[in-house]
Image: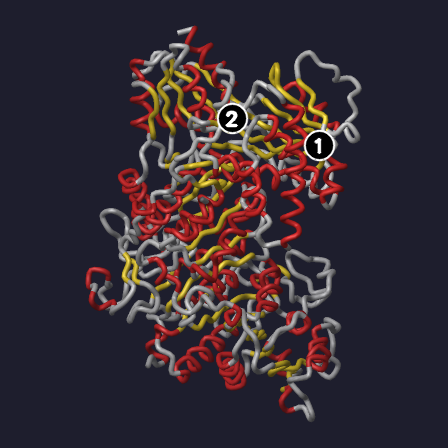
């Protein structure tokens, strides 16, 4: 089975020193190694953004798609080859902004795949504009007077939309993130892992320190029940807070917000998806009985 | 232009408000005539509404092969007054109008010296038979009696139409048709027009162009179809969905067209034969991903069934104004193939061939049609399913990448985008041992990695590799089809693409007895453009014309650009209606006279 050294490409990552993507890369490689999956067993899909440059740093079967369109691209893979686990990497602008429509519909489909969002609350690759998850009133080159609107609450939206697995990680805690990745890979259904991975170059508000001062783990919270959708939704409301809030005024929960076992996935609704669908194109299909309908 | 001779040809038009089941009634009638051994061609015209607005269904029936609708009508079934007002002029001298005097007033059009009124109490008979909705069924019976056609074919057709409904519904409709038939049999007497069954004819198919496309895709081994509904492409989605479980196809109605084509590219990545289809507006949303299919060398088939634009345009009408658009769509440059079926048989054949071309070239292939192809039903000879082949090109589906050293880099890793002489790289499917690979929307190196794609030499090598596939495409794509006499012998040579084929072929049949010799060329593969064939054809012609359904002369522009020659004349149409053979007959006659 491939080890971390096999999964790494010869190319060195080009992310900024200290970027949260380095830790996410490390966590995912290590979880892939321990998963026991072979290279043939999974495919990775990337959107466009700083996270997407990661496509070059893995040895994997994969597709580096368009900005915002990683989920439908991944869906096409998942719904045409039942033998392949699909792991999707997206950014916050990529996955919640331009790809927001696909986000909502992928959640409600409960497609069996893992969706990892590299959420740095800023547009890194295009030099620092506000993203859909930037805090309200944050000043950026595209919002010099401050972001007017409230941020997207991806965890809350997913929970409201019927998601079956919703977790949030923090790139500053690799071991915790790995546990989330493990659970997401094991989940039968659409597993959403939103990861705060601070941008050290453009986001001067939501820094590693900002998060370290505020994160707490849901699983360490007394009596938190990740099968309670209402409680999970309430926990997601921490998204909305003052830009300048003090550490004790805005706590950031991480961990598994919600998890539902025994889910009915989109693939479960497709009895015809009983083999890799390319096998239908080894010879012409016999359509004589269908043609008879038109005689 | 020939008039229908007694017993051999008939044109019936049914008109009324949307929601009255006009199209369904017309199709029932069409099935009756096909069962009787006759050829049919129908044309539905309807506004983009579910109820309200004026709908018509026109059926042409003939004992001889026919390839289009015509402008004139022999029997008009007017379910409302608006039908009389809008279509009375189309009825030929001596034709008939079936109407219900209780519904359609006779003020202003009767008495008539031109048409024969056939008043039938349609609403009353329908109510007596079971319900007012059956007025159109009563009218079908009345029409068949008028033209001396046996009722039994309609009865069989009604039983087929209502097979999945309660038995009493079927029997009510049969009763409604019978009462209309009996009533008019008494009135019809020696009405001069009619069409007679042709027993002993070989079986034909009765279907529309979208069904032909769907059948072609199924025959080709499609495993994944995704679409967002858009007129006139939607019924391909319905067709595929109806067969998904039995045939083994994953069919997805997506959240938008962007998702549809991205899913199709994802399915193609796993080696699945995959297709999406839409109209011009939906294709606008697909264009970015269409380019990704080009740079990632994904084998996908995209149906673009066009209608008059721009924007929402005329949703339920037809036009050929997206030719340049589909040839040029996307930023950047990459090879693509665009096939333009002219009729239902073309649609079936070009669709299964499109899948082979996509695999052989590892690039997107477009099937360019329009509403006139999608919507209209025609009787055609059974499709040649024995001719269907599956050629997946340079594809490896199993084994080990190590067995293909020619596709490996110095480090032993697989080169998905290996630079080759013909531009096509060995495609080893994900899942095959050792086939780690990155398909990429970025420019990339031979492995597929984007970082080195910015190297100028890598960019040039990959760009040139891809564009070499366009030269390979020229050797693989269907050649232009020619009809009629040799261009050197012709009084007029006509060039066209797509569904203009039917009306052109029909007009050519009419010109034959006039002694006008016509040579015709259908540009079947519109991209890569068959410049040599078109230039040779036009070079031999004395007088030439291009007929195309758009304002700006897009095909003519391509001929000038690609062949460095021009034609003498042109005929355009851009009012949302298909070309009629009458229009083309008149124009070709004029051009030939001026020769």
Q: CA distance from mark 2 to mark 1?
A: 23 Å
Dot 2 corresponds to which residue?
B195
Question: Residue at horizontal 40%, vertical 40%?
Answer: B203
Q: Earlier in the sequence, mark 2 or mark 1?
A: 1
> Nearest the camera: B122 or B519?
B122
Q: Quadrant of residue A263?
A: bottom right
- Tell me residue B148's x, y (percent): 56, 27
- Tell me residue A239's x, y (percent): 70, 73
State whether residue B5 appears in this view. Answer: yes
Dot 1 corresponds to which residue?
B79
- Tell me residue A38's x, y (percent): 35, 77
Q: Quadrant of residue A28?
A: bottom left
Mark 2 secondary-structure assignment? loop
Residue B338 lies, with reference to residue A45, above or below; the image says above
Q: Chain of mark 2?
A: B
State the colouring used for the structure image: secondary structure
Same chain for mark 2 and mark 1? The answer is yes
Residue B252 lies, with reference to residue B13, above or below; the image says below
A256 with respect to A229 (left or right): left
B472 with respect to B112 (left or right): left
Question: Residue at horizontal 52%, vertical 83%?
Answer: A183
State whether residue B460 appears in this view. Answer: no
> Nearest the camera: B531 or B176?
B176
Mark 1 surroundings within 10 Å by alpha-carbon count, few (fewer than 14), some (14 through 19), many (20 or more): many
Q: Chain of mark 1?
A: B
- Tell me residue B78's x, y (percent): 69, 29
């Amino acid at each position: 089975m491939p080890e971390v050294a096999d999964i790494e490409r010869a190319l060195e990552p080009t992310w900024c020193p200290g970027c949260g993507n380095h830790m996410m890369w490390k966590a995912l490689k290590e979880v892939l190694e321990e998963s026991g999956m072979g290279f043939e067993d999974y495919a990775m899909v990337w959107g466009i953004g700083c996270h997407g440059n990661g496509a070059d740093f893995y040895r994997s079967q994969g597709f580096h798609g368009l900005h915002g369109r990683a989920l439908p691209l991944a869906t096409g893979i998942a719904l045409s080859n039942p033998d392949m686990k699909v792991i999707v990497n997206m950014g916050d602008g990529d996955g919640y902004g331009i790809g927001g429509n696909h986000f909502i519909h992928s959640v409600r489909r409960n497609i069996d795949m893992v969706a990892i969002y590299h959420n740095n609350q800023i547009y890194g690759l295009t030099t620092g504009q506000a993203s859909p998850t930037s805090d309200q009133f944050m000043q950026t080159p595209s919002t010099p007077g401050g972001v007017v609107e409230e941020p997207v609450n991806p965890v809350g939206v997913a929970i409201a939309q019927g998601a079956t697995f919703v977790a949030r990680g923090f790139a500053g805690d690799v071991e915790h993130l790995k546990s989330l990745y493990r659970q997401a890979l094991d989940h039968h259904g659409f597993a959403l892992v939103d990861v705060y991975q601070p941008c050290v170059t453009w986001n001067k508000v939501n820094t590693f320190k900002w998060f370290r001062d505020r994160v707490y783990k849901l699983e360490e919270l007394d009596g938190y029940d990740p099968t309670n959708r209402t409680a999970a939704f309430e926990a997601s409301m921490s998204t909305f807070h003052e830009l300048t809030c003090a550490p004790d005024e805005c706590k950031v929960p991480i961990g598994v917000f919600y998890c539902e076992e025994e889910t009915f996935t989109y693939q479960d609704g497709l009895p015809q998806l009983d083999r890799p669908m390319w096998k239908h194109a080894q010879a012409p299909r016999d359509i004589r009985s269908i043609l008879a309908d038109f005689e | 232009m020939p008039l229908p001779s007694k017993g051999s040809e008939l044109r019936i038009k049914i008109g009324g408000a949307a929601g009255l089941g006009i199209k369904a009634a017309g199709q029932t009638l069409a099935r009756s005539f096909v069962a009787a051994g006759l050829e049919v061609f129908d044309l539905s015209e309807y506004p983009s509404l579910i109820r309200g607005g004026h709908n018509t269904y026109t059926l042409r029936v003939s004992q001889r092969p026919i390839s289009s609708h015509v402008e004139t009508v022999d029997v008009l079934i007017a379910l409302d007054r608006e039908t009389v007002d809008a279509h009375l002029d189309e009825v030929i001298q001596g034709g008939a109008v079936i109407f219900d005097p209780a519904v359609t007033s006779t003020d202003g059009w009767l008495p008539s010296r031109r048409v024969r009124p056939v008043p039938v109490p349609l609403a009353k008979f329908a109510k007596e038979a079971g319900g007012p909705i059956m007025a159109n069924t009563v009218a079908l019976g009345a029409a068949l009696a008028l033209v001396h056609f046996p009722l039994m074919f309609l009865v069989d057709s009604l039983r087929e139409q209502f097979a999945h409904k309660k038995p009493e519904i079927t029997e009510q409709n049969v009763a409604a048709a019978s009462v209309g038939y009996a009533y008019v049999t008494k009135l019809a007497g020696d009405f001069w027009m009619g069409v007679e069954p042709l027993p002993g004819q070989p079986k034909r198919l009765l279907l529309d162009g979208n069904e032909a496309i769907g059948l072609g895709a199924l025959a080709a081994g499609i495993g994944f179809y995704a679409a967002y509904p858009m007129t006139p492409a939607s019924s391909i989605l319905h067709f595929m969905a109806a067969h998904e479980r039995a045939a083994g196809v994953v069919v997805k109605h997506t959240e938008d067209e962007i998702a549809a084509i991205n899913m199709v590219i994802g399915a193609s990545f796993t080696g699945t034969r995959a297709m999406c289809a839409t109209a011009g507006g939906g294709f606008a949303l697909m264009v970015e991903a269409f380019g990704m299919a080009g740079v990632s060398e994904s084998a996908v088939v995209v149906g673009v069934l066009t209608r008059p634009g721009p924007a929402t345009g005329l949703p339920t009408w037809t036009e050929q104004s997206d030719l340049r658009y589909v040839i040029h769509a996307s930023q950047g440059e990459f090879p693509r193939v665009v096939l333009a079926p002219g009729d239902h048989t073309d649609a079936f054949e070009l669709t299964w061939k499109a899948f082979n071309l996509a695999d052989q070239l590892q690039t997107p292939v477009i099937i360019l049609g329009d509403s006139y192809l999608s919507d209209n039903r025609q009787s055609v000879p059974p499709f040649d399913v024995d001719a269907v082949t599956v050629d997946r090109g340079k594809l490896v589906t199993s084994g080990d990448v190590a067995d293909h050293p020619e596709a490996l880099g110095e480090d032993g890793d697989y080169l998905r985008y290996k630079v080759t002489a013909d531009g096509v790289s060995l495609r080893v499917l994900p899942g095959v041992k050792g086939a780690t690979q990155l398909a990429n929307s970025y420019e990339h190196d031979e492995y597929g990695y984007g970082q080195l794609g910015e190297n100028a030499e890598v960019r040039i090598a990959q760009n040139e590799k891809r564009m070499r596939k366009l030269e390979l495409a020229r050797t693989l794509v269907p050649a232009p089809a020619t009809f009629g006499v040799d261009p050197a012998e012709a009084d007029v040579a006509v060039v066209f693409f797509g569904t203009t084929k039917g009306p052109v072929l029909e007009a050519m049949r009419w010109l034959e007895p006039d002694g006008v010799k016509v040579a015709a060329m259908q540009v079947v593969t519109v991209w890569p453009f068959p410049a040599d064939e078109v230039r040779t054809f036009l070079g031999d012609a004395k007088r030439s014309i291009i007929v195309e359904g758009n304002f700006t002369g897009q095909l003519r522009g391509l001929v000038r650009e690609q062949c460095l020659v021009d034609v003498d004349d042109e005929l355009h149409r851009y009012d949302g209606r298909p070309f009629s053979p009458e229009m083309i007959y008149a124009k070709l006659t004029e051009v030939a006279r001026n020769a």
